[in-house]
């Protein structure tokens, strides 16, 4: 299953690179670029997987960073064409905001279940707990913030997509995009719900799964 998951992620990255490298410049606006990258950023977002919030934020940050790649190869060499950079980022951020507004309850509810199960294992089965290299507990977050990750954690195909940048700037660029996504998702949606103490809120927000459809790639 791990092999299949790797192939799936690689196919998404290839789709993003085709979008960026092969698109006819004249047909792409900042808005359309963001709308084409956004569905790719959500396809790894299974809320049942371990560290689901962490992985979803990492994915959304990476595909937001792909706007930079488009600008580097298709926009900055031709400034006279008037591509609206701000529109691309703002559109992407608005879509991310909508994603977390709709699915935050599902993510938080399932995170809390995993956290509780992990704490029970830590309390009653220390040997099994020690086999978990990355326990899904807040005190084990080591990347500078709750649910954050670093550039070094990206899979190799995603790192390869950023190799046009100087080595010393890649991690800083990823951190910048992760912080943008983190502010939208965690600061505005996840943390307020996680610490609201209201199970009714969790149940109400998670019910959106029955009436909302996740983004898909056309």
Image: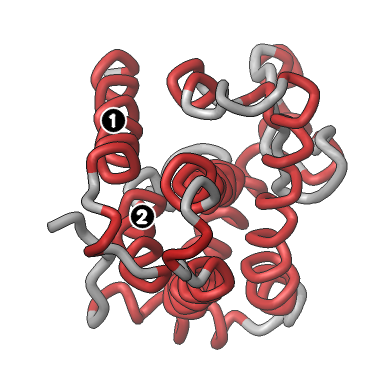
Does residue 163 appear left or right of residue 16 in this picture?
right
- Residue at 70 percent across and 37 percent down: it is 149
Looking at the figure, which quarter contains the N terminus?
Answer: top left
Most extreme residue toward the front is 80
The residue pinned by badge 2 equals: 37
Where residue 159 sits, quadrant-wise, is top right
> Sequence order check: which comes first, mark 2 or mark 1?
1
- Residue at 38 percent across and 73 percent down: it is 31
Query: What is the spatial separation of the Cα atoms under label 2 and label 1, in whole angstroms?
Result: 12 Å
Q: In the rendered view, tell whether residue 96 sits above or below residue 119.
A: below
Residue 215 x, y percent position in the rendering: 27, 64
Residue 202 x, y percent position in the rendering: 54, 78
SS at badge 2? helix
- Residue at 68 percent across and 22 percent down: it is 152
The numbered dot on residue 14 is 1
Residue 177 x, y percent position in the rendering: 66, 52
Does residue 109 appear left or right of residue 192 in this picture?
left
The numbered dot on residue 2 is none
Q: In the rendered view, tell whether residue 83 sits above or below residue 198.
A: above
Residue 155 x, y percent position in the rendering: 51, 21
Q: How many marks?
A: 2
Looking at the figure, which quarter contains the C terminus?
Answer: bottom left
SS at badge 1? helix
Q: Nearer the viewer, residue 135 or 61?
A: 61
Look at the image and tell me whether residue 52 can be seen.
Answer: no
- Residue at 76 percent across and 31 percent down: it is 169
């Amino acid at each position: 299953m791990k092999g299949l998951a790797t192939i799936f992620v690689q196919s998404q990255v290839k789709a993003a690179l085709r979008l960026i490298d092969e698109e006819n410049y004249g047909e792409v606006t900042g808005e359309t670029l963001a709308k084409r990258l956004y569905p790719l950023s959500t396809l790894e977002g299974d809320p049942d997987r371990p560290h689901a919030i962490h992985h979803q934020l990492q994915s959304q940050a990476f595909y937001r960073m792909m706007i930079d790649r488009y600008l580097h190869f298709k926009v900055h060499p031709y400034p006279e064409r008037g591509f609206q950079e701000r529109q691309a980022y703002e559109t992407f951020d608005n879509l991310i905001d909508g994603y977390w507004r709709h699915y935050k309850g599902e993510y938080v509810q399932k995170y809390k279940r995993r956290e509780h199960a992990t704490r029970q294992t830590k309390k009653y089965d220390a040997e099994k707990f020690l086999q978990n290299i990355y326990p899904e507990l807040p005190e084990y977050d080591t990347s500078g913030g709750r649910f954050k990750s670093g550039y070094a954690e990206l899979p190799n195909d995603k790192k390869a997509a950023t190799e046009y940048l100087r080595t010393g700037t890649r991690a800083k660029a990823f951190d910048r995009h992760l912080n943008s996504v983190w502010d939208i998702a965690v600061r505005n949606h996840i943390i307020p719900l996680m610490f609201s103490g209201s199970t009714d809120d969790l149940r109400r927000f998670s019910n959106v799964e029955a009436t909302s459809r996740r983004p898909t790639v056309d």
